[in-house]
Structures are given as C-alpha cells and as structure tokens.
C-alpha cells in the first residue's frame, strides 16, 4: 500500500492519496489499486490520523460496499462467496490479470 499527499503537514489538511501497489481483487479497488472509500474523498476530516485511515481500509476489505464499486466484476461475484473465493484463488495462483 502506498500513502502519499501532503505528508509534511500533520494533521493532514486534505485526504492523503492511498492505493494498493500489489494486485487486490475487491469490489472497492480498481485494477490500478485506487480505493473507493468515503474518507479518502468527500468525508475527510483533519481529525483523522494514520490509524483511523488504516482501520477504515481494514474494515472496507472485510465488508465491501458493492453498491459503490470500482471493480464491478468483483462486486457481482461478492454476492456468491464461493465464486468470489474461486476467482481470487485462480487469479492469485495462476498469475492472471484481474478483470474490472
């Protein structure tokens, strides 16, 4: 994961730029690693710190929001957990490119 932005000023006055550097097949992560998370967009507050940000990402990874997907294919599969797990396993172990 990469965190960037105006890191010289704490607390962050604007939301930091956060993205995954490695593949992440997830309804709220696109093929470039961008993350769809409200606090990284219009819900940012300078009261948030790195801990808040990482906890929010951890929560999103466990409980995606398929109603606001960056990866519509992953969002469709999310409703069938077995198909989702099979697709993730196949792509990670076969080295296939992720679909979006």
Image: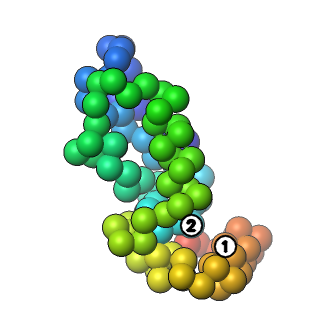
Q: Where's the N terminus, which quadrant?
A: top right
Q: Position of residue 94 (x, y in %)?
A: 74, 75
The local crowd at label 2, few if under 14, some if 14 to 19, many if 20 or more residues have their Cα within 10 Å, is many
Q: Name which of mark 2 and mark 1 comes first in the sequence.
A: 2
- In the rendered structure, the answer to whether residue 58 lies left or right of residue 18 reads right
* Residue 35 x, y percent position in the rendering: 42, 53
- Residue 24's place in the image compared with 15, above or below, is below
Q: Which mark is residue 4?
A: none
Question: How many dots with numbers?
Answer: 2
Q: Residue at x 38, y 28 (%)?
A: 48
Q: Which mark is residue 25?
A: 2
Label 2 element class: loop
Residue 35 visible in the current orientation: yes
Q: Position of residue 68 (x, y in %)?
A: 34, 67
Q: As rendered, which of 34 and 95 lies closer to the eye?
A: 34
Q: Give the x, y percent position of residue 60.
A: 50, 54
Instruction: Judge whether 85 appears above or below 33 on screen.
Output: below
Q: Residue at x 22, y 45 (%)?
A: 42
Judging by the rendered image, the residue that carries numbered circle 1 is: 88
Specify the quadrant that holds the C terminus. Answer: bottom left
Along the viewing direction, whichever of 22 and 58 lies nearer the viewer = 58
Q: Secondary structure at mark 1?
A: helix
- The colour scheme of the drawn protein is rainbow
Residue at 56% in and 66% down: 25
- Residue 83, relative to residue 98: is it above or below? below
In the rendered view, tell whether residue 91 sits above or below residue 41.
below
Mark 1 Cα-neighbour bin, 10 Å: few <14, some 14–19, many ≥20: some
Cβ atoms under marks 2 and 1 closer than 8 Å:
yes
Residue positioned 69% across, 83% down in the render: 82
């Amino acid at each position: 994961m990469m965190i960037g932005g105006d890191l010289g000023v704490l607390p962050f006055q604007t939301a930091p730029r956060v993205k995954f550097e490695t593949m992440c097949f997830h309804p709220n992560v696109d093929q470039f690693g961008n993350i769809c998370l409200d606090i990284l967009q219009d819900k940012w507050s300078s009261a948030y710190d790195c801990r808040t940000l990482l906890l929010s990402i951890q929560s999103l990874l466990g409980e995606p929001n398929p109603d606001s997907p960056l990866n519509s294919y992953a969002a469709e599969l999310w409703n069938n957990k077995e198909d989702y797990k099979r697709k993730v396993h196949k792509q990670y172990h076969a080295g296939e490119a992720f679909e979006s």
